[in-house]
Image: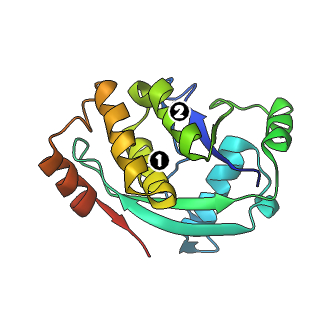
Amino acid sequence: KDGYLALNQRKNVAEYEGHINLHTGGIELHNGMFSPYATCIDEIHEESGIPREEIPHLECIALVGNIRIPRPYTLCFHAQTSLTKGEIEKLQQYRDMKEGPSKFIPYTYEGLHAFLHQFTSIMLSESLAMIYLLGKEAFGEKWGRKALEIIDQSHYNFLSLDMKKRKLYERNLISLVH
């Protein structure tokens, strides 16, 4: 609501302990049918404490694949809540956040760059790709070039590919759903 992206810093999990990731989970049955949207709302609720009814807007924005891990592509959603960052943090104080509290990123030109400077080395590739795409879409090509410089400086091996491979990655492995 107030201009932040909420991510999860993985805690008490089998894989990637301490890494920063989107709120994730496998698609579950809802009323006898597989529903990515209902699963997404459930995962946001389970991992952030945000009540389901406080997520009035949910949009599928990307299909992300990781070339290093042979598994199905990930559907990525952009969810908006009617709660502020402070209200979410207050909710999390009273819940058992077994996978860890949310990590909030100011959704601004400078805020996303600062986040990348600080946390690129511990971000899962799908989350890093989504932040790159969200920032590039919101703030333009100049922001995207600067983000890639930050990623390169951090020696993040997944995205420290040459420009030709980056373009291939962006074109073929991340398809924006518009």
| Residue 15 visible to the viewer | no
**Are the two marked residues, 2 and 1, in contact with CB atoms closer than 8 angstroms?**
yes
| Residue at the disc numbered 1 | 131
| Residue at the disc numbered 2 | 115
Q: Quadrant of residue 9?
A: top right
Q: Secondary structure at mark 2?
A: helix
Quadrant location of the N terminus? bottom right
- The answer to whether residue 108 is above or below residue 150 is below
Q: Answer left or right for 74 relative to 33.
A: left
Q: Position of residue 129 (x, y in %)?
A: 38, 47
Q: Residue at x 32, y 35 (%)?
A: 149
Q: Residue at x 53, y 45 (%)?
A: 22
Q: Are there few (<14), some (14-19), or many (20+) residues within 10 Å of tag 2?
A: some
Quadrant location of the C terminus? bottom left
Q: Residue at x 86, y 36 (%)?
A: 90
Q: Are there few (<14), some (14-19), or many (20+) residues within 10 Å of tag 1?
A: many
Q: Position of residue 151 (x, y in %)?
A: 34, 33
Q: Residue furthest front?
A: 142
- The answer to whether residue 65 is above or below residue 149 is below
Q: Amino acid at mark 2?
A: Phe
Q: Answer left or right for 88 relative to 44.
A: right
